[in-house]
Image (cartoon, helix red, strand yellow):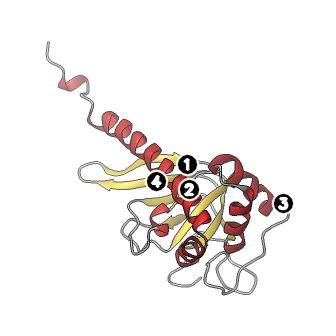
Amino acid sequence: MTRDEPAGAITSTRGGPVGDGDGGDVLDWPPGRLAEASELLRGATSLPEDVGRRLLAEGVWRHYLRGALLFRAHAPSDRWLVIIRGHVALEMKVAGRGTVRLLTLGPGDVVGWSAVLGGARMTTSAVAAEDTEVASFAAEAVQRLCDDDPQVGYHLMRHLAGTLADRLVATRLQLLDLFAPGPHDRTA
C-alpha cells in the first residue's frame, strides 16, 4: 500500500492500488461491472449512452472494504467517483459533536464532485458504509474530456448541478435535525 492510497482499498496482484487513476497498476473491470456501471450512469444520471461510454473509458474499477476511508475532508480533490455497489457515508467533524454523518449515498450517486471543478479540496470525508465498488475517474481526465467535447461537459455539468441541488436540500434537512430544540430546550 502506498502512502497516498486510501486505507481499505483492494490492491492489485502487482502491488499497486486498484483504480488509482494514474495509469499505474490497476485491475481490469470485473466481469459484468462495466456494463452495470454503464446502466447506472444512464439510469441514475440521465447521461446519454455515448457520454456515459466516453466517461467510463476514462474510469477504473475500485473496491473498498467496509469502514475504508475513500477520502478525507480538506484533502486535494483529485478523483471523482460513481458508486456502483454499496453505500458511502459523507461525514464531517463538528465542534462539540465529533464526527457527524451528513448523508449516505448509494448506487448511481456521485462522490467527490468537486474534483470535476479543478483545484478544489474535499468538503467532507467519505467512508465505505459497507463493502463498496465505485467507478473512479482522475479529475484531470474528466476535465480534459469536458474541455475536448462540449457535449460531454454540458451533460456532466448539468448532472452535477442537479446533484448539488439535491445535496443542498439534504444538508438543510440535516441542519434542521442538528439544531432542532430537544426536550430539554422546551419551556412550559
Q: Earlier in the sequence, mark 3 or mark 2?
A: 3
Tell me the distance, in whole angstroms, between the alpha carbons under discs 4 and 2.
11 Å
Q: Is residue 25 left or right of residue 144?
A: right
User: Which circle's residue, 4 or 2, is located before the other in the chain?
Assistant: 4
Q: Is residue 112 above or below residue 47?
A: below
Q: Residues within 10 Å of mark 2 (few under 14, many from 20)?
A: many
Q: Are marks 1 and 2 in contact (CB under 8 Å)?
A: yes
Read off the residue under disc 2.
110
Q: Which residue is mark 1?
A: 105
Lower sequence index among marks 4 and 1 = 4
- On the image, numbered disc 4 is attached to which residue? 90
- Tell me the distance, in whole angstroms, between the alpha carbons under discs 4 and 1: 8 Å
Residue at horizontal 39 percent and vertical 65 percent from the top: 73
The Cα–Cα distance between marks 3 and 2, rounded to whole angstroms, is 20 Å
Type of amino acid at the residue the image marks with label 2 = Val
Q: Is residue 68 above or below residue 76?
A: above
Instruction: Tell me the kind of residue under disc 1.
Output: Leu
The image shows residue 57 at horizontal and vertical percentages of: 72, 72
